[in-house]
Image (cartoon, rainbow, N blue to C red):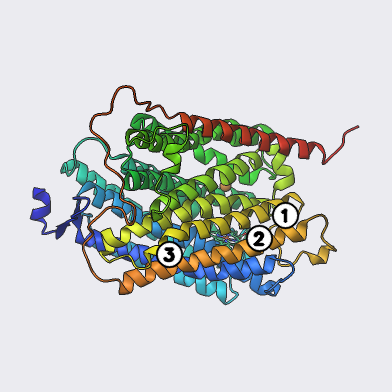
């Protein structure tokens, strides 16, 4: 604490969490969070137009605009929105949650400026048709077509993010040195540290892909091997999803605590699961290269199956231990009837909890199951580049990560923006509306993809009349898009109106609607605290997973008949 006073850092004490909040960190968290929301708005406008184009009966946009907006949507959502939000999360975890000052906030503003400028530049290039190359910008298309300023924008954004991550690490180092908190890192911060470590090599890999591509678009070099670009692009693009994953799981633990005051059943096991991410998850990136001819079958299978399953194990540990933590704390509160009384009595009307529940469901049951299945070399042969792929990642990254981040934002408003959350009644419904919409988007995409509809197609009618129930699947995608867009507009309205027009006030409670009942100090020995309901849910999940996986092999077996 002495160090803080020496440096004249302004702190306030949060009346609810008792955290010592560095006001400079608070301002940076606000700026990064608002930038994230603006990106979400832009990406969301593109999203509904894309969904209404893929709904073949409407086919709204002409192809040029479809591809332009597809590029903008991919970048604004998957890169700009998510990364700005994560930088806000890192400053929150590294400074606020550790009661420490944010080291060198000026550098934080430089990082913010680079990211914001880079994002604006990329958007201008994409929207003025100077970079209609998809967010992947594969070689040789990418550097033949895209303006060098497109690459410059992406590189500035990535370097700015790297600076922000660096600031986070220096901040936690100083916090540790000054002993601003007791004991080891809180689990949530530990999750952010893992996300930060993954972010470092992710962003460096991005530079290895994008810097030569920019050099080529400037004419400084003549060739850039497509396989080289793809390899490094995906050492950036896939691990970026693992940053999202680690940050999302950290947010899951945070919300579990906020909404239920539940601690993890085994904190050691949860930490171990985070370490599994760190060690194994980037190997799974090879699933993007499963159709690349230059790589051996053994290399592909080792990385996408054996190695990746260790990372999947990490996710399963989290996904089973969080409901178990909820069940144990609910049982302590006396909800011990049958297997599922604890479950029925969960705070379904609390916005953060609703977001957590929807996020865990969509991430695990749809995103996770389809991802592991399609990552299998053989099954990938029929799903690669079909709509099944965006079907999978909309469940994972939108249904999972974006919804978790939305839920978390509701708490940042009273705690960090120090404003009253307006439209709380909407906030209670928003995760369900958005989640239901995204579920339909995802299922529509997956079922269309299974019938062979390709991703990134403005219009599939050129290939002749669609077979089977393709039209129905695409209609489900379109209707889901309308519902999800409604949920997105609800979120943006709640957040932006609260941030700009909500009455200023200090937070007075951790939760927004449902205050959890206190947990009794002494629990009689005969109360059954074992999470038996969770165990049943886990078994059902594993059975569903196995059935889906085997059904895919069965379908694959019906694709080519040997004999
Ligand atoms: C209202 C919510 C959303 C809707 C309705 C929506 C819809 C769509 C549609 C229709 C496509 C085009 C698929 C294709 O034809 O291949 C797409 C692509 C994509 N979306 Fe979304 N999306 C939404 C939110 C998000 C969010 C929040 C993210 C990321 C966090 C995201 C990431 C992506 C990515 C990375 C692509 C692929 C771009 C490409 O192929 O280059 N989407 N989305
Ligand atoms: Cu991937």
Which residue, as the protein is rendered here, is positioned at the far top? 525
User: At which x and y percent is residue 324?
Assistant: 42, 34
Q: Earlier in the sequence, mark 1 or mark 2?
A: 1
- Name the residue tied to disc 2: 477
Which residue, as the protein is rendered here, is positioned at the far bottom? 128
Q: Which secondary structure, mark 3?
A: helix
Q: Is residue 509 left or right of residue 443?
A: left
Q: Earlier in the sequence, mark 1 or mark 3?
A: 3
Q: Quadrant of residue 517?
A: top left
Distance in Å between CA atoms under marks 1 and 2: 9 Å
Q: Residue at x 59, y 67 (%)?
A: 482
Report how many numbered discs are placed on residues in the image: 3
Distance in Å between CA atoms under marks 1 and 3: 32 Å
- Name the residue tied to disc 3: 426
Disc 2: CA contacts within 10 A as few (<14), some (14-19) or many (>=20): many
Kindly identify which numbered label has been placed on residue 448.
1
Residues at marks 1 and 2 touching, judged by CB atoms closer than 8 Å: yes
Residues at marks 1 and 3 touching, judged by CB atoms closer than 8 Å: no
User: At which x and y percent is residue 335?
Assistant: 38, 36
User: At which x and y percent is residue 83?
Assistant: 43, 57
Q: Residue at x 51, y 41 (%)?
A: 282
Distance in Å between CA atoms under marks 3 and 2: 24 Å
Q: Is residue 94 above or below residue 421?
A: above
Q: Which secondary structure, mark 1?
A: helix
Q: Is residue 497 above or below residue 348?
A: below
User: At which x and y percent is residue 320?
Assistant: 47, 34
Q: Residue at x 74, y 56 (%)?
A: 453
Can you see residue 15? yes
Kindly identify which numbered label has been placed on residue 109.
none
Q: Is residue 113 left or right of residue 459?
A: left
């Amino acid at each position: 604490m002495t160090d803080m006073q020496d440096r004249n850092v302004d702190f306030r004490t949060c009346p609810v969490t008792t955290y010592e909040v560095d006001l400079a960190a608070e301002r940076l968290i606000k700026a990064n969070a608002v930038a994230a929301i603006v990106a979400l708005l832009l990406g969301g406008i593109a999203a509904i137009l894309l969904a209404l184009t893929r709904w073949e009966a409407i086919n709204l946009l002409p192809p040029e605009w479809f591809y332009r907006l597809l590029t903008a949507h991919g970048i604004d959502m998957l890169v700009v929105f998510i990364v700005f939000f994560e930088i806000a999360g890192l400053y929150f975890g590294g400074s606020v949650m550790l009661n420490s000052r944010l080291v060198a906030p000026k550098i934080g503003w430089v990082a913010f400026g680079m990211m914001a400028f880079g994002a604006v530049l990329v958007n201008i290039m994409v929207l003025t048709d100077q970079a209609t190359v998809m967010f992947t910008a594969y070689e040789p298309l990418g550097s033949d077509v895209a303006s060098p300023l497109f690459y410059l924008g992406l590189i500035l954004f990535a370097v700015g993010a790297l600076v922000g991550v660096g600031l986070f690490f220096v901040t936690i180092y100083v916090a540790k040195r000054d002993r601003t908190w007791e004991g080891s890192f809180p689990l949530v911060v530990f999750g952010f540290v893992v996300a930060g470590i993954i972010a470092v090599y992710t962003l460096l890999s991005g530079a290895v892909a994008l810097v030569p591509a920019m050099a080529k678009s400037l004419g400084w070099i003549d060739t850039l091997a497509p396989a080289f670009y793809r390899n490094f692009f995906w050492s950036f693009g896939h691990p970026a999803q693992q940053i999202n994953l680690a940050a999302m799981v950290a947010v899951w633990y945070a919300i579990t605590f906020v909404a239920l005051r539940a601690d993890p059943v085994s904190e050691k096991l949860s930490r171990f699961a985070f370490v599994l991410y760190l060690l194994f998850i980037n190997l799974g990136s090879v699933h993007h290269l499963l159709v690349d001819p230059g790589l051996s079958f053994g290399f592909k299978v080792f990385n996408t199956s054996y190695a990746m399953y260790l990372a999947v194990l990490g996710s399963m540990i989290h996904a089973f231990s969080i409901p178990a933590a909820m069940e144990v704390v609910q049982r302590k509160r006396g909800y011990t009837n049958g297997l599922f009384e604890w479950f029925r009595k969960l705070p379904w009307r609390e916005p953060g909890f609703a977001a957590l529940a929807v996020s865990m469901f969509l991430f695990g049951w749809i995103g996770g199951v389809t991802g592991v299945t399609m990552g299998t070399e053989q099954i990938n042969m029929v799903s690669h580049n079909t709509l099944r792929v965006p079907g999978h990642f909309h469940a994972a990254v939108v249904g999972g990560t974006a919804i978790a981040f939305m839920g978390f934002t509701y708490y940042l408003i009273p705690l960090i923006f120090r404003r009253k959350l307006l439209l709380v009644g909407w906030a209670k419904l928003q995760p369900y509306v958005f989640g239901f919409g995204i579920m339909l988007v995802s299922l529509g995409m997956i079922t269309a993809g299974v019938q062979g509809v390709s991703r990134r197609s403005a219009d599939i009618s050129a290939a002749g009349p669609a077979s089977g129930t393709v039209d129905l699947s695409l209609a489900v995608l379109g209707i889901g898009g309308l519902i999800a867009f409604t949920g997105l507009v609800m979120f943006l309205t709640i957040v932006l109106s609260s941030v700009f027009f909500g009455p200023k006030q200090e937070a007075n409670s951790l939760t927004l609607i449902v205050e959890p009942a206190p947990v009794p100090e002494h629990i009689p020995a005969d109360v059954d605290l074992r999470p038996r309901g969770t165990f049943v849910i886990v078994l059902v999940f594993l059975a569903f997973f196995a059935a889906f996986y085997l059904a895919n092999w069965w379908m694959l077996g019906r694709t080519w008949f040997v004999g």
